[in-house]
Image (cartoon, rainbow, N blue to C red):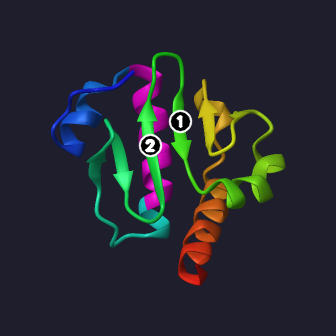
Amino acid sequence: MKRDARSPRAYRNDVTGEQSEMLETIRNAILSVAPDTEEIIERGMLGYPGIANLAAQKHYVALYVMPAVLAEHRENFSGADCGKSCLRFRRPDQINPRRLRVLLRDVLEARRNA
């Protein structure tokens, strides 16, 4: 579900209910690992250049990261639907902020070493 928001704030304000809670939990994990990152709208999603993209879809919230790094962490997210480059969360209880931060730190490390 692509949103027409023109700013990250407008995007976040457009998301409601449990999805808003999930979006903010994941967003907070991203910003705790990379507090100086810019938050942008990229391809109709929240973008965090060099780290991740974040999208509220119709039935889930998706976090997009580097496929190679996600493959190393896949087993840590057994409650989420895991694609090649994304984690799809349908419920807030599927999100473990500590594990997300570890994943995101590894994404940053992989980008630095690329």
> Is residue 75 toward the left or the right of residue 27 in the image?
right
Q: Is residue 1 left or right of residue 14?
A: right
Residue 85: in magenta span: no
Kindly indicate whether the residue at mark 1 contacts the one at mark 2 (C-beta within 8 angstroms): yes
Q: Which residues are magenta?
A: 17-30
Residue 54 pos. (x, y %): 44, 43
Q: CA distance from mark 2 to mark 1?
A: 6 Å
Quick check: 50 above or below 110?
Answer: above
Residue at numbered disc 2: 54
Looking at the picture, does residue 90 appear above or below residue 88?
above
Q: Tell me if 111 is positioned left or right of 15 in this view.
A: right
Percent of width and height locating residue 42:
31, 46
Mark 2, other Cα within 10 Å: few <14 / some 14–19 / many ≥20: many
Q: Which mark is residue 62?
A: 1
Residue appearing at x 48%, y 62% in the figure: 51
Residue 37 percent across, percent down from the top left = 34, 68
Quadrant including the C terminus:
bottom right
